[in-house]
Image (tube, grey):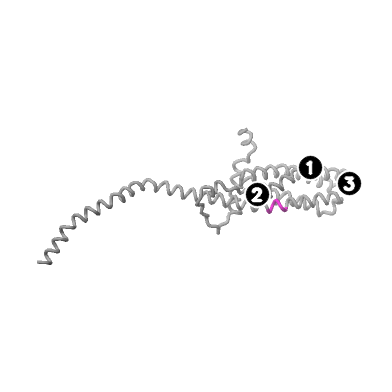
Amino acid sequence: PRRSQSDMALPEPVRRRLSNFSRTVFSDSNRTVPEYPDAGCSPDNEIVSSLPLQMSLYFNLYFFPFWWVSSVVMLQLKYSVLPDYYKFILVTIIILASLIEAIRLYLGYIGNLQEKVPELAGFWLLSLLLQFPLILFLLFNEGLKIQPLERAVHIIFAFFLTFQVIAAFLALKRMVNQLATRFHLHEFDQLDRHSAPDYPAWEKKRVQAPWVAGSHLEAARPTTIGWGSALKA
């Protein structure tokens, strides 16, 4: 199972580029690192995946076959009356949208459930830059002779995409800020570990300090008495 999961993961160069993109776009530079006084409130135990986004992906997964069947049936019915270039464009868009949707839903599920920033960033980019423009083209281009059923399913698809783009953006901001918090807390832990060896020696000196002070006071007593007798004399 581990081998299959690694085979399905994004290539390392793509993950690196998506991680850099996420830190640049979604990180909040004005955000201060929060304090976690209790162990249960640590950022490692905080869940930042989005429940609304996951519900949207779940319903989108069942809606997409209905959208695909409706688009293919409507294409077959009006194929003979379409110009040749619109035939090619419409077939190409349906094929591309189907491939993009399969990849997009997979990245959305993995990125949101497992809180993986590169996968969720890839989902967000595919939704915003590829799938959303394709659906808008199918929805508003009257040269495609849009039928009422097509318009209805395209509108629903556009609503799904709009909601998912917004929800994924907010989830990515939370994930990136949480990773930044973990990084800063890890740096603080490393500083504590480096300063920890000096603690026993300092504690030893602190414990021995009263005895040392006591010995100095004992040594100072004869001197004090001597000064008193001298004053009396």
Q: CA distance from mark 1 to mark 3?
A: 20 Å
Q: Taken as a whole, is the magenta stretch helix, strand or loop?
A: helix
Instruction: Say what amino acid the circle numbered 3 marks.
Output: Lys
User: Is 8 situated above or below 191?
Assistant: above
Q: Image quarter for residue 64? A: top right
Mark 2 to mark 3 CA distance (whole Å): 40 Å
The quadrant of the picture occupied by the N terminus is: top right
Residue 95, how many percent across, how many down? 77, 43
Where residue 90 appears, as percent x and y from the top left, is 81, 47
Q: Nearer the viewer, mark 2 or mark 1?
A: 2
Q: Using the numbered discs, state the Cα–Cα distance from disc 2 to disc 1 in whole angstroms.
A: 24 Å
- Look at the numbered disc 3 and give the secondary structure of its residue: helix
Q: Is residue 60 within the magenta segment?
A: no
First along the sequence among labels 2 and 3: 2
The stretch in magenta equals 162-166
- Residue lying at 53% horizontally and 47% vertically, measured from the top left: 40
Residue type marked 1? Pro
Q: Which residue is label 2 attached to?
A: 50
Residue identified by numbered label 3: 78
> Of the numbered discs in the image, which one, if any, rests on residue 65?
1
Q: Is residue 176 left or right of residue 126?
A: left
Q: Give the SS element for disc 1.
A: helix
Which residue does the image show at 49% across and 48% down from the upper left? 186
